[in-house]
Amino acid sequence: MTQRIIPIESPLFVPEASLPAAGGLGALFPRRAPLALEIGCGIGDFILQRARQQPETNFLAIDIYNKGCLKTCRRLEQAGLDNVRVVRTEARYLLSHCCAPGELAAVYINCPDPWPKKRHRKRRLVNREFLQSLLFYLEPGANFYFSSDIADYAEEVAEQMTTLPAFRNGLAVAVARDLPGYPLSKYMRRFLDLGQPIHFVHARRDRAWQADPAELPPVAAGFRVRWSCAGNG
């Protein structure tokens, strides 16, 4: 079934075709400030709360669904927030085509599609290759947050991050049941109300780690990726 595309007229919405091909994503904002990225913003519940918490930060919220981007823009406008921009795009495309190395101060991925069936788990967005690529776009000391209502997905992400020294700061990455001060979306609260925990992973990019462009994994066409490229090509 083809998704009906509803035009988004919000000044907070950036069409994918208007994304900067060079110079980094900071060019989307009228002011220079630390830049944080939410991958999979849904209807904007999390990013609305986080943007209020951190008005000194610029936030870019992305999703592959048109309706979610539309609802996110409406909520942000109603709240009077101007430190968020919304793009309908795929995360790997955005990072490899538009993001400058070391540009992101934080990345948030909240409850992505878990693909719980074992035969479908290769479709999960967050795997070792994705994390290894993401490192190149995080600034030294940048925060990475992941959450899932599926325990094995969070455990898998934490395990993969532990194998990447740039995420470890010398320590294993752990899964937590709570992050003080971390906004909870309506989706998260619904599960918590049912007595089902949310599993959180939080780590920082080691300040001493030096990025080597030769180690940036190629991004190949695959599930939900309509293009292919090598490295930052």
Image (cartoon, grey):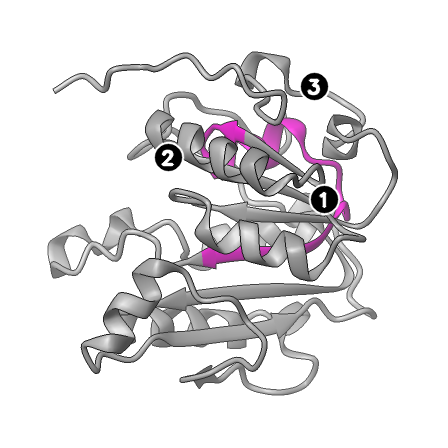
Q: Quadrant of the N terminus?
A: top left
Residue 66 rendering spot, x and y as whole percentages: 37, 25
Q: Is residue 150 visible?
A: no
Q: 90 above or below 118?
A: above
- Residue designated by label 1: 213
Mark 3 / mark 2, whichever is N-terminal? 3
Q: Quadrant of the C terminus?
A: top right
Relative to 103, 190 lies left or right: left
In the image, which is nearer the foreground, mark 3 or mark 1? 3
Which label belongs to residue 96? Answer: none
Mark 3 / mark 1, whichever is N-terminal? 3
Relative to 215, 113 lies left or right: left
Amino acid under disc 1: Pro
The residue positioned 45% from the left and 70% from the top of the image is 160
Amino acid under disc 3: Ala
The residue positioned 16% from the left and 60% from the top of the image is 116
Amino acid under disc 2: Gly
The residue positioned 41% from the left and 34% from the top of the image is 71
Q: Which residues are magenta?
A: 87-109
Q: Secondary structure at mark 2?
A: helix
**Quarter occupied by residue 106:** bottom right
- Residue designated by label 2: 68
Which label belongs to residue 21? Answer: 3
Q: 78 above or below 189?
A: above
